[in-house]
Image (tube, grey):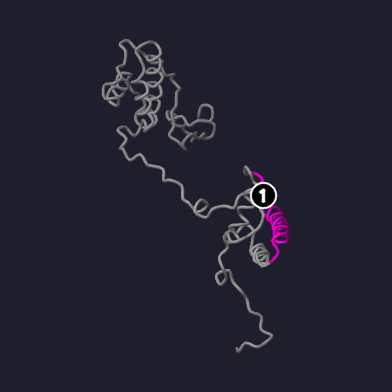
Amino acid sequence: MEANENTIKLYYNTEVEKLQMPEYGRNVLHMVEQLKEIPDKAKRTEQAYAVVKVMESLNPQVHQQENYAQKLWDHLFIIAGYDLDVDAPYPKPVPEVINSKPDPIPLNTKPIRARHYGRNIESILDLIASEPEGEVKTAMIRSLAIYMRQQYLIWNKDTVADATIFQDIERLSEGRVKVPEGLELSKLSADASFARPGMNLGFGGNGKGGKFNRNYRGKKGKK
């Protein structure tokens, strides 16, 4: 079918210039392009304020940001390709600063020596090792041991000896943390239950406090 003068041509977003600020839409881009063509600077500045008001109404969530008024003017200059000569109430943004990428966050690639305790345990042990000997350090070791026992029971067995936890503390700290002789942990209650993350569920009210009881075997139904 040949095109004639009455044929309507459809434009798709893939065929037109990519928007620098899509949240404002293409109509705002056209407004900014017309704004740049105004020869009188005073009139151009007056219309720039009007365009910023339109942008504010189209992007109301900008109010949740600090210095949102300045951000709106920054967005205006970005849409204009930084080529806009107006008397703005804020300094003109610099493309090198706006387009700069944040510094990458370094990843800790050091292997975890005991995965069931997690990486943070090693940092806590470093902190405890720097503490002077005394009641405070003993209390810190005891609190850490109780937490490590809990993590151990989540991922391993139903029971674990205190001596095993104490040995792990000294091993993971490479001997820098010595467990005081005679240190004892609080006893676990008979119905204590430890669930893995995402497994803390109740089944038909059989768990304690909505938690799944690993010792529950279920009742045999009557025949």
Q: Position of residue 209 (x, y in %)?
A: 54, 27
Q: Magenta stretch containing residue 55, yes or no?
A: yes
Q: Position of residue 104 (x, y in %)?
A: 41, 46
Q: Residue 107 occupies which quadrant of the picture?
A: top left
Q: Position of residue 134 (x, y in %)?
A: 37, 11
* Residue under the image location 51 percent in, 51 percent down: 97
Q: Position of residue 126 (x, y in %)?
A: 34, 25
* Residue tagged 1: 89
Instruction: Please name whichever residue, 124 or 200, is drawn nearer the observer in this view of the structure.
Output: 124
Element carrying mark 1: loop
* Residue under the image location 69 percent in, 52 percent down: 56
Q: Magenta stretch containing residue 49, yes or no?
A: yes
Tell me where the magenta segment starts and ends, as one range.
38-64
Q: Residue 51 occupies which quadrant of the picture?
A: bottom right
Instruction: Please name whichever residue, 182 or 193, is drawn nearer the observer in this view of the structure.
Output: 182
Instruction: Please name whichever residue, 60 or 39, is drawn nearer the observer in this view of the structure.
Output: 39
Apparent side of residue 93 relative to residue 128 in the rendered image (left or right): right
